[in-house]
Amino acid sequence: MTSLTYFRAYTMTTWFVRNACFVVLALGIGTGCAPVCSRTDGACVELAVSGAGTYETYSIEWRHTTNEEPFAAIRRGATEAGGGLPRIFRLTPPPSVSAETVTSVGVLGLSHGGMEQAGGSIELTLGADEHARHVLPLGLRVERTDLSLDASTTDLVATDLNGDGTIDLALVGMTEGANAGSLSGGLLSVLYGNGDGTFFPPLTADIPTQPFSVKAVDINADGQKDLFTTGVGDSLSLFQNLSFDQIGPRTPILINPGPPTIDCPTPTNPRSLAVGDLNGDGVLDLVGGVRPCLVVLLGTQKSGFVASGDALRPSPLFVGDSLTRLAMADFNNDLRQDVAVIRTAQGIGNISVLLGGELMKGLSFATTFTAGNEPTDLLSAELNGDKKPDLAVVSAKSSSLHVFLNKGLVDGSFGGGPAVTNTPADFDYYLGLPGYGPTCLASGDINQDGLLDLAMCDAALPTIGVMFGRGGGGFEPPIRLLVDRTPSAIAIADLDGKGQLDLVVSHAASNRLTVFLNRSN
């Protein structure tokens, strides 16, 4: 399988051409303009960038293949003044990148302060001394707004919490000055949407622990989504959704296990959470990852939340390694929810799939397979249009994205077996310098072409990478959007009610929340 690597460079040209010249080159009609690569030795690309607007700078990203360990370098050259679109760039491959290995190039236009951004990418091949001409449409255009919060953020969800038809936000994080791992300083923030991409000031609730994640689900069947959080300690937190734009007080949910096992001591510090009907009784259940085990809390009645005193608590299920993120879906089409969980150890990254269906136990092992180097996030979604939930996994350590397509097997194994297998991913993408890659992941049809797209955080650059779906479970090279330092979570939703999916990004190292309103159409 060919590995794909992204090489980032900020080398600008000062070439400026009139629109008429652009049209001639874009349509490939004769030589109406002097070729901008004509006096360049070696490989050169005349890139005609279409679109509208004026941008102060343009950044260039190269993609190339390698048969060795997937490495890429990040180089920043002189950034020159930009100009209006359409325009033509003269581009030469960055140092240490052989022209023959180039497979695509991307462009990001930035306005003052990055408040408007437009990007695109295009596949191409290039010989050692070839002068090529290509047209690149800027397929993603966004309007950026930054909001200040009372806390840095570790996770967020975007959903309609108050039933008014607009998207609201719920975030968890740590207040300024609080220490990671402490039993104080946690904060839940709820921002109700105005319907135009702006939000009311946040309503906040204290969490007596460092929070890790937040989920929104209607746990008591009243038609309103409630909020669950995980964090340091021996309990989850439930905030029930009340009427009149109010969130109820925190209710702790102890994760004390059922009968103890040797491999699973008393669980603490649940890092992730999944909610769904595991055993087919019509009641929502909870699954928490408490490394190296999964704790299952089986719901007992539709009208009460899962933490009622008689809630069943099966013995913790030993999975192994350090469990971080969970995804829930019906992988084997038996009308019961299953769970995929990231397992990480030093230099190792595995995904375990566990099947729901057992009335009194909730989950049973199906398969474990390798997925990158210490994966950092995963999601389940229908990526290739066959009505079966697939898996996408990202790894910061190997700076990679791996797509595993659901093979439709009754054991939900994605082609592997019960033991750890080296089942190859259906698609592998290497995104940059290992150790500094994506840390979070989200999906949605951002460009409205009927294909699911992916958006991921890259804490090192720092950027958001948007990869448009190309069908069959594959994706185009990423289009970068600049954000604040250390993006921690991303959500995709129609924030302004204009029928296009927008993006919202939280940050672990700052109190900033960044909203990208989609202006592509």
Image: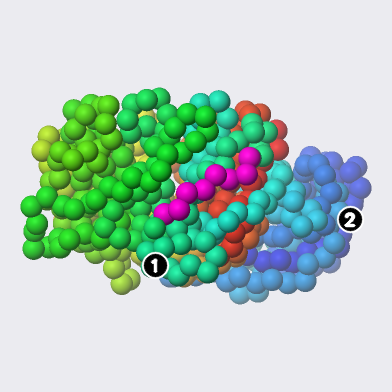
Q: Which residue lies at the image location 55% right of the left edge and 58% below the top edge?
A: 151
Let me know if residue 133 appears in the view: no
Quadrant for residue 22, please give it: top right
Inspect the magenta stretch and tell me whether residue 205 lies in it. Answer: yes
Q: Which residues are magenta?
A: 200-207
Circle 1 crowding by C-alpha within 10 Å: few under 14, some 14–19, many from 20: some
**Quadrant into which the N terminus falls:** bottom left
Inspect the image, locate mark 1, and give the three-letter code of the amino acid beneath it. Ser
The location of residue 247, given as percent across then percent down, is 46, 39
**Quadrant into which the C terminus falls:** top right
Quadrant for residue 139, please give it: top right
Circle 2 crowding by C-alpha within 10 Å: few under 14, some 14–19, many from 20: some
Let me know if residue 202 appears in the view: yes
Inter-mark Cα distance, 1 to 2: 56 Å
Q: Nearer the viewer, mark 1 or mark 2?
A: 1
Chief SS of the magenta region: strand
Q: Which residue lies at the image location 66% right of the left edge and 29% below the top edge?
A: 498
Whether tag 1 and tag 2 are in contact, CB under 8 A, the answer is no
Inspect the image, locate mark 2, and give the three-letter code of the amino acid beneath it. Phe
In this orientation, which residue lies closer to the viewer: 113 or 415? 113
Q: Which residue lies at the image location 62% right of the left edge and 56% below the top edge?
A: 512
Q: Which residue is mark 1?
A: 182
Res 16 label:
2
Earlier in the chain: of badge 1 and badge 2, it is: 2
In this orientation, which residue lies closer to the viewer: 202 or 379? 202
Left or right position of 296 against 503: left
Q: Which residue lies at the image location 34% right of the left edge and 61% below the top edge?
A: 232
SS at mark 2? loop
The location of residue 235, given as percent across then percent down, is 28, 53
Left or right position of 329 against 454: left
The location of residue 30, given as percent across then percent down, is 85, 44
